[in-house]
Amino acid sequence: MPFADSHLHLPLVEWGEWRKAGLASCVVCAEPPQWQTCLNACQILGDAAIPALGVHPWHLEEFSQDETLARLEAHLLACPRAALGETGLDLTPGRPPLECQLAWCKAQLALASRLQRVAVLHVVRGWEPLWPCLDAFPQVPLMLHGFRGGIQEAARLLRRPGAYLSLGFFLLRAGHRLRETVRSLPQERLLVESDAPFGGHSPRELPLLVNHLATLRGEDPEGLAHVLEKNHRLLFGER
């Protein structure tokens, strides 16, 4: 059955094997040094590979904000199908200061709003300071990469008509709280991702994740796979 990977990274060295396994489409996230490489690769691979360009909250202090955002805007304008991301907030110890992360997150969401692009969000322990940022840009479609929030966070996100929650292989080891949250999520707002090459997983393993998700939710795996792929196309298709 065809499936979509809503979040992975360069390199795409096993692209042929992924396609043979059923990969229909994927979103390829890239950091500033890889932006042009990502765009070039996605152009060669065609509609099946969608670039997502942004500045990850882990690496903000490595770049000049004004110059980097200007380059990001130029790249996005040159590629109308590209998404923005990943951006967001990560408040684990050792990450850039919250003020720095908020400034970058607001600026990137403003750019996504102005250019009408999907924003791919990375959020770890940053929900409370993130809400005002999101509320300031209510029209931006969102994909919550690696969503591990609770029922309250999910409910607030899903009040936005363009918000989707993407689940990864951490779901195989999820505790009771996350399993209960996942069971409560509407099927039409779900996505799945490999986050390859991080975590040691590959897009070709996604059918296993979909089967696990279907079992957890008491749903038919093939029917769920069809909905997940449709959700991916609705969010990341031609805008």
Image: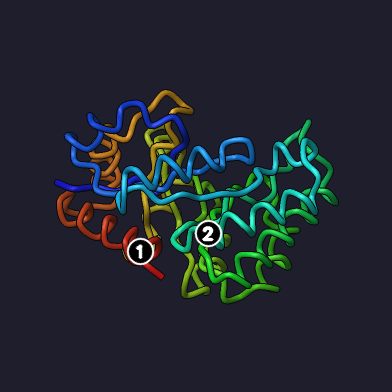
Q: Residues within 10 Å of mark 2 (few under 14, many from 20)?
A: few
Q: From the viewer's perspective, tell me whether residue 173 is left or right of residue 54.
A: left
Residue drawn 50% across the image and 37% down it: 37
Q: Is residue 31 above or below residue 123?
A: above
Which residue is disc 1 drawn over? 237
Q: Residue furthest top?
A: 200
Q: Tell me what residue is drawn at x 16 percent, y 57 percent.
A: 223
- Please tell me whether residue 106 is drawn above or below residue 72 in the rendered image: below
Question: Is 100 positioned to the left or the right of 144 in the image?
Answer: right
Percent coordinates x, y for residue 121 in the rendering: 58, 53
The quarter of the picture where residue 31 lies is top right
Q: Which mark is residue 78?
A: 2
Amino acid type, label 1: Gly
Q: Looking at the rendering, which quadrant does residue 233 occupy?
A: bottom left
Q: Is 33 situated above or below 126?
A: above
Dot 1 surroundings within 10 Å: few (below 14), some, or many (20 or more)? some
Task: Give x and y (percent) for residue 145.
Answer: 50, 48
Q: Is residue 61 left or right of residue 199?
A: right
Near-viewer residue (25 or 78): 78
Q: Nearer the viewer, mark 2 or mark 1?
A: 2
Front residue (pair 142, 16): 16
At a point 29% along the width and 33% down the height, the residue shown is 15
Image quadrant assignment for residue 69: bottom right
Choose between 207 and 234: the one closer to the eye. Answer: 234
Figure check: 28 above or below 107: above
Q: Residue at x 58, y 48 (%)?
A: 86
- How many labels, in total? 2
| Kind of residue at disc 2 | Ala
Task: Name the secondary structure under disc 1.
Answer: loop
| Residue 238 percent location from the top left of the image | 36, 67
